[in-house]
Image (cartoon, grey):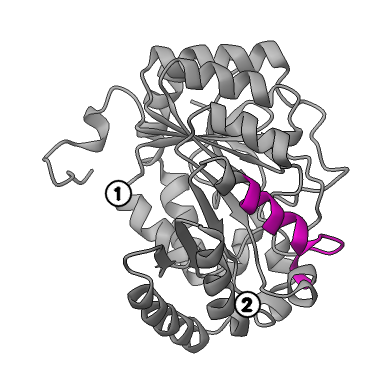
Amino acid sequence: MAKDLQGIGFSDLKSPLFFAWHMTNKCNLNCIHCLWESGPQAAWPDELAEQEAMEVCRQVMELQIPYVALSGGEPLLYPAFWRVCESFSKNGVDIKIESNGHPIDGESARRLASLKLRSVQISVDGASQETYSMMRAGAKLEKALNAIKELVKHGVTTEIIYVPAKFNSHEAERLIDMAAELGVKAFYTGKTMYIGRAVRNWDTIGLSEEENEELSRRLERKAEEYRNRMAILFYPYSVVEELKYRLEYPAASLLLMANGKVKLIGSMPFVCGDVRRHSLAEIWQRYIKAWERPEVIKYVNSVTETPSLLARANDFVDLGF
């Protein structure tokens, strides 16, 4: 596999540099673009129990993985959320939390601030309630914005993730202005991922290549406007483009799902381990080998020709080695 800029091979690493944890598939919202198809009734019956979660924490620290991202679903709904965060925080692990913001009030913002997080990322997909609720039916934009206000007030580095769609891209600049006024430090967006519910709703959501390029140009102008105040980043790759890249340059990261299974990447169905059966150290070695498996290579080549096959991404296909 390819070497990085320091000449260190991906397979030379003794442990991952990043650990993404999909803590629960339960969410208080039911968004039309959700890559995991999360929702109020979508918690998986075999999600990790608290003691299993704490064993994962122990192994993350044993491997000296420096950085974790906690997501869902809505991670604040996971019963062991606070205990996991406190364990990582007191042991010097950098933590990023990805939330829709609705469960965050003044008290939880104060508690999050005490953890000395790297950042909290709030999903906001519109600058008006009408547009926002088209993506997140029944959700209140005011709740997401109030969460941002409370986090900023308590000194938490706060970011926004924005998913563009046919019905909201015209509000991107207005939302960026709102974010800057609120004290947000970074605004992230990019091509919407063709996975999960987005596949079923693509006629409503999906932007054309020309529309994505036009949005990117508009955001470049906003990035220049706010260059000394807030980072504005547009990720330019589609799911298929990223998969082709990762086949040659796998990320030094693990993706732990709520049921204990570890996937190669969210846009593929392949599982390289299970924390109920394997240690994280063992899973890391399996992960390295998995990127060279013929079925993984075949899948990437297949979705390149037929993107609709990405509808399989949320399956769990054990590589069985």
Residue 148 inside the magenta-drawn segment = yes
Q: Position of residue 287 (x, y in %)?
A: 41, 32
Residue 257 visible at all = no
User: What residue is at 65 percent from the left and 14 percent from the top?
Assistant: 52
Report crowding for label 1: few under 14, some 14 to 19, many 20 or more residues within 10 A (C-alpha). some
Q: Is residue 88 above or below residue 34?
A: above
The residue wearing badge 2 is 206
The residue wearing badge 1 is 249
Q: Earlier in the sequence, mark 2 or mark 1?
A: 2
Q: Which residues make up the magenta segment? A: 134-150
Residue 286 visible at all = yes
Residue 197 inside the magenta-drawn segment = no
Q: Position of residue 282 (x, y in %)?
A: 43, 18
Quadrant housing residue 18: top left
Q: Residue furthest front?
A: 153
Quarter holding the N terminus is top left
71 with respect to 300 (left or right): right
User: What residue is at 33 percent from the left and 69 percent from the top?
Assistant: 227
User: What residue is at 22 percent from the left and 28 percent from the top?
Assistant: 12
